[in-house]
Image (cartoon, rainbow, N blue to C red):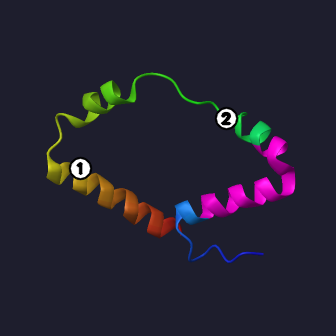
Amino acid sequence: MMDVSEMTPVEIQRAGLAVLARELGPVGFIRFVQQYELGYGDYTVERHQWLDDLTIDEVLSLVQSEQDMENKNA
């Protein structure tokens, strides 16, 4: 089993996808991935709605808060 305690979220995602591809094969892997919704809406418009009124300091503070929560839950 992999030691995920030192892995970044991106590394964990890549490792998970590699395991799925290996265990399910190409067709099973694609079928699995297709089960997830692609999303909806216009991200660019929505991003402007929630970011345009924020200062860079406020954005940085939000990012730091998210990182603090990730570290706390790790």
Query: In this orientation, which residue lies closer to the viewer: 7 or 53?
Result: 7
Residue 73, percent from left and from top: 52, 65
Q: Quadrant of residue 53?
A: top left
Residue 63, percent from left and from top: 31, 56
Amino acid at pointer 1: Val
Give left or right: position of 28 versus 43: right
Q: Which residues are magenta?
A: 12-29
Residue at x 61% of width, y 58% of height? 13
Q: Which mark is residue 59?
A: 1
Q: Quadrant of the C terminus?
A: bottom right
Give left or right: position of 45 versus 2: left
Residue at x 51% of width, y 23% of height? 40
Query: In this orientation, which residue lies closer to the viewer: 70 or 41?
Result: 41
Q: Badge 2 local density, few (<14 within 10 Å), some, or many (20+)? A: few
Query: Is residue 1 shown above or below 38?
Result: below
Q: Badge 1 local density, few (<14 within 10 Å), some, or many (20+)? A: few
- Asked if residue 26 is among those painted magenta in the image, a careful observer would answer yes
How would you classify the magenta stretch by its main secondary structure?
helix
Mark 1 or 2 closer to N-term? 2
Q: Nearer the viewer, mark 1 or mark 2?
A: 2
Q: Which mark is residue 36?
A: 2
